[in-house]
Amino acid sequence: IANLVNLEQFDVFNNALTGALPTVFGSFANLERLILQANSFVGTIPSEYGNLEKLVNLQLGLNDLTGTIPSTIGTNSLEVFDISSTRVSGPLPESLCNVQTLVITDSDVDASACLQ
């Protein structure tokens, strides 16, 4: 995967993939869509995903993810962010308050910062 530096879209929805979310995606400067939803990924959301300035769609829901959302996520052109049905918890970073489509159902994320 590391050699796909010009990759714009990566979609492996519902492929029974396991292990930690790959941090290498954080170095793909042209990546616009990263769909890792409905697999069996574990662990935390890599802070490296916040490096993706062109990323508009990040779907990580329906995985066994834990921890908090890195504050670097959403500081770019992100329009869709989905962590539904995960065990991610803690406060929603204010950088995600203006995302067009925010899906945090069935998670323990506190979105109260966006309601002020």
Image (tube, grey):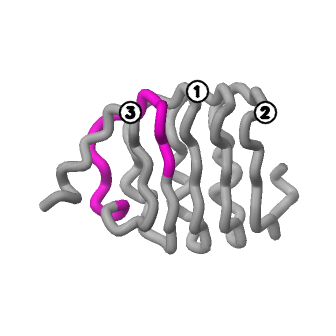
**Residue at 67% over, 50% down:** 35
**Residue at 71% over, 26% down:** 18
* C-alpha span from label 1 to label 2: 14 Å
Magenta-drawn segment = 82-96
Task: Place residue 104 in its image quadrant.
Answer: top left
Q: Nearer the viewer, residue 98 or 89?
A: 98
Residue 42 among those drawn in magenta: no
**Horizontal side, residue 14 vs residue 98: left or right:** right
Q: Nearer the viewer, residue 65 or 59?
A: 59
- Disc 2 + disc 3, Cβ < 8 Å: no
Q: Nearer the viewer, residue 62 or 53?
A: 62
**SS state under label 3:** loop
The amino acid type of the residue labelled 3 equals Ser
Image position of 30 with respect to 44: above or below: below
The amino acid type of the residue labelled 2 equals Asn
Q: Position of residue 55 (x, y in %)?
A: 60, 67
Residue corresponding to mark 3:
107
**Horizontal side, residue 102 vs residue 37: left or right:** left
**SS state under label 2:** loop
Residue 87 among those drawn in magenta: yes
Q: Residues within 10 Å of mark 3 (few under 14, many from 20)?
A: some
The amino acid type of the residue labelled 1 equals Val
Residue corresponding to mark 1:
42
Residue corresponding to mark 2:
15
* C-alpha span from label 2 to label 3: 22 Å
| Label ID, residue 31 | none
* C-alpha span from label 3 to label 1: 14 Å
- Disc 1 + disc 2, Cβ < 8 Å: no
Q: Position of residue 82 (x, y in %)?
A: 50, 48
Q: Please name which of the two marks, 1 or 2, marks the residue nearer to the observer.
A: 2
